[in-house]
Image (tube, rainbow, N blue to C red):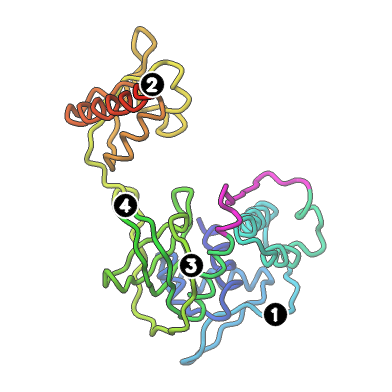
Amino acid sequence: MKIDRQLGILSILLQRENVTASYLAQMFEVSVRTINRDVEDLCRAGIPIVTRQGISGGISIMDGYKIDRTMLTREEMQDILAGLRSLDSVNGTNRYGQLMEKLSIGSSDFLVGNQSVLIDLSSWYKDSLALKIELIRSAIEQHKELEFLYYAPKCESSRTIEPYYLIFRWSSWYVWGWCRDRQDFRLFKLNRMDKVLVSERVFSQREAPLPDLRDERVFPGGIKVKAMFEADCKWRLVEEFGTGCFTEQKDGKLLFQADYTDKENLLTWLLTFRDKAELLEPAELRDELRKSILQMKRKYDNDN
């Protein structure tokens, strides 16, 4: 949507001193002409955006100006403010709140009351995430390498990357960058990163493609799952997979069918239902789950 893209442009301009139209076009997967129209719309709305030509040119937002909101509808302004609040909810700063004051100048009801959309992107890891986000943003802006310890499913390892994008997707935060060990671009989950440091080494920016974040690309599926759940598990199945993931049986049980991506995640997920779920297919994973349950039983039987 146009308003979502313009909100994104405002957010980027607030974070970075200067960006090019081609950078924004790549970021939002639209043409440079579309970006230029968005910038023109924002300028007509009174937002103080400056464009400069030449090698060091680009698009920037001017400091010290109050923003006239008369060209934005009330609904558009509410969407913008909701998005800005969501960014303050994770980074522990008030920089977006300060922009909100400029956006809502002369109309206090934009700041208090009459709010129909409230977005909070914080999590249980808010304190640690805020620090990581600020460090990563600093590394991206200064073109400095990022060092950290990473906990992957198979092992933990020390990584050094050239960071390019901070991404919020699938209810989690990620950083996209060039990994020196893998000699390729990789996506790293912030909650799995520890001992994050901004190196003094400055890297030369390379052509950084936007990550392909389509669900079918990152979570390709491949495991055809069939399982039977007790009736009182319905709320979880609906919450996590939607109402179309199961067929209600005559006895009230729920026949669940879905594609799953990762074997270990599937088995762990099923165990969270304890005795209220039974894996029917695939047969080899049913057998593996049975063996795991027997091993667990032996551990608990050894209490005596």
Dot 3, how many residues are within 10 Å of its Cα: few (below 14), some (14-19), or many (20+)?
A: some
- Along the polypeptide, which appears first: circle 2 or circle 1? 1
**At 61% from the left edge and 61% from the top edge, which residue is drawn?**
91
Mark 1 residue type: Asp
Q: Position of residue 141 (x, y in %)?
A: 51, 78
Mark 3 residue type: Val
Q: Which residue is mark 1?
A: 63
In-front residue for pair 180/80: 180
Which of the 4 image quadrants contains residue 289? top left
In-front residue for pair 153/205: 153
| Viewer-nearest of discs 4 and 3 | 3
Q: Which residue is mark 3?
A: 196
- Along the polypeptide, which appears first: circle 1 or circle 4? 1
Tag 4 secondary structure: helix
Which of the 4 image quadrants contains residue 264? top left
Estimate the spatial distance between the alpha carbons at disc 3 and disc 1, rounded to whole Å: 31 Å
- Along the polypeptide, which appears first: circle 4 or circle 3? 3
In-front residue for pair 122/239: 122
Q: Which residue is mark 2?
A: 304
**At 20% from the left edge and 29% from the top edge, which residue is drawn?**
282
- Along the polypeptide, which appears first: circle 2 or circle 3? 3
Q: Which residue is mark 4?
A: 218
The residue segment tinted magenta is: 113-129
Tag 3 secondary structure: strand
| Viewer-nearest of discs 3 and 1 | 3
Q: Position of residue 3 (x, y in %)?
A: 56, 58
